[in-house]
Image: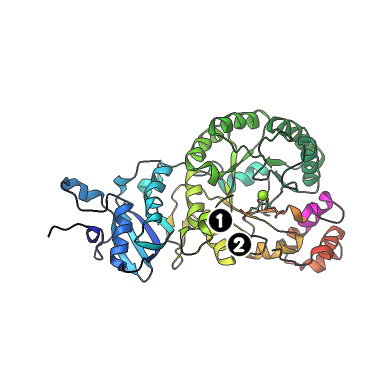
Amino acid sequence: MARIEWYADFVNTSYRPNKNDLVALFYFEPAKGVSSKEAAGRIASESSTGTWTTLHKLPPRMKDLMATAYEIKGNYVKIAYPLDLWEAGNAPQLLSGIAGNIFGMKALKNLRLMDVVLPPSYLKNFKGPRHGIHGLRRLMKVKRRPMLGAVPKPKVGFSASEHAQVGFETWLGGFDLVKDDENLTSQKFNRFSERVRLMTKLRDKAERETGERKDALINITGETREMIKRAKVLHEHGWRYAMLDVVVCGTSAVQTMREVLGDYGIAIHAHRAMHASFDRNLKHGITMQFLAKLMRLIGVDEIHGGTAVGKLVGGKHEVNSIANVLREKKTRAEAGTLLAQNWGSIKPAFPVSSGGLHPGLVPEVMRILGKECVILVSGGIHGHPKGTRAGAIAARQAVEASMHGIALEEYAKKHEELAQALKKWGRLKPK
Ligand code: CAP
Ligand code: MG
């Protein structure tokens, strides 16, 4: 009888990837009755040239585009993809292959894309961050400490003027950045253009009064042509950053905005809202590490990566591992999670630590992430017993104490804002 399936043709354990292959690491669980080898072959097949059955006609050159599952170890498989499968500089197309149909295959109970090694020949068609860590430090004149920012809280509901006023208090307390929340764009109670106008006035005032650089992560998320208009407004008002909800916008829009904002010299702050819908289940979906990698590749300057100690999921290992992906020139391999990646000339990006932080948690965040990060303390400054400005002062004191290796309680003896924050929250880890 003629062969119906050809999945085995996509498995070759003696294959060794060449320097132009793109190599993906998957965690997989075959469905009942499916062998590991067959499941691995199906993943390689559906993510490259295959279909469910043998074909009547197959041009010989097709062989050169087939992916190869070449290493199967327990529930992990490595698959090598020839470079020519991928269009240069097209991030959505990459996802349609390695993160597309394969997640829905009946032959698999679970499938998780852990990481991908991008060869130099593939990397070279992407821009990476416009400024990166060093560029942002120069832009903001913040030399050594973590960058500090806060979102006015509640998340949405303030008028543009109330919002700008909270921002002003945040800046005057010593913070560098005032961030919009992910679901604030241009609602009728707080229009984008009005917010930008008022924030600009108060930013200039704050810069004059403090002698420090002050900026904001104003959310331009929307339909792509609208984002282009909003980017222009930010440019005309002299802003150095823009914020994008990168997952909901999609890689195509992020690539477009990297072009537009990059031409203006504006940095991208990436909020990752919706990431947990595909990275939270440890057996299925896509890791946050890979999302971070993809975003660094297509050009965000900083992206949320979790706190390990705050209100949202994501442990210490994951937070460190995301930082490894974002900050290193050569990302180190980590067993079962990360593959080694040489970033070539692509700049490093800041990991952003946010969600449920307050001054008492700052030392722990800095123990995990060090100084090369952005720390957002939002509820944890606006909830300070003396208000936003005192809250920001307290958080900055907590950063100073950590930079000097001084225990918070000790530092608080001479810094009353910090003492007040510690009295309210101590080392509380919010849920
Ligand atoms: C933080 C935050 C961010 C989260 C997102 C919020 O506020 O603005 O959206 O940090 O999560 O709305 O929760 P708080 P992540 O500081 O008041 O908690 O950074 O993990 O992507
Ligand atoms: Mg938020």
Residue in the image at 64% along x and 45% along y: 182
Residue 313: which disc? 2
Assess disc 2: are there few (<14), some (14-19) or many (≥20) residues with their C-alpha within 10 Å of its C-alpha: some
Residue in the image at 79% along x and 64% along y: 425
Q: CA distance from mark 1 to mark 2?
A: 9 Å
Assess disc 1: are there few (<14), some (14-19) or many (≥20) residues with their C-alpha within 10 Å of its C-alpha: some
The residue to which callout 1 is attached is 276
Q: Which corner quadrant holds the C terminus?
A: bottom right
Q: Is 160 left, or right, of 218 in this rendering?
A: right
- What x and y, as percent, mark residue 362? 71, 61
Q: Are marks 1 and 2 in contact (CB under 8 Å)?
A: yes
Residue lying furthest bottom: 74
Amino acid type at circle 2 is: Val
Residue in the image at 47% along x and 49% along y: 294
Residue 374: which disc? none
User: Which residues are the magenta region?
Assistant: 381-397
Front-lying residue, 93 or 208: 93
Q: Within the image, what quadrant is residue 177 found in?
A: top right
Q: Within the image, what quadrant is residue 9 found in?
A: bottom left
Q: Is 393 contained in the magenta span?
A: yes
Amino acid type at circle 1 is: Ala
Q: Which corner quadrant holds the N terminus?
A: bottom left
Q: From the viewer's perspective, is residue 408 above or below residue 387?
A: below
- What x and y, as percent, mark residue 57? 16, 46
Q: From the viewer's perspective, is residue 358 above or below residue 62?
A: below
Residue in the image at 44% along x and 67% along y: 336
Front-lying residue, 220 or 200: 220
- What x and y, as percent, mark residue 215? 70, 40
Front-lying residue, 32 or 23: 32
Q: Within the image, what quadrant is residue 19 found in?
A: bottom left
SS label for mark 2: loop
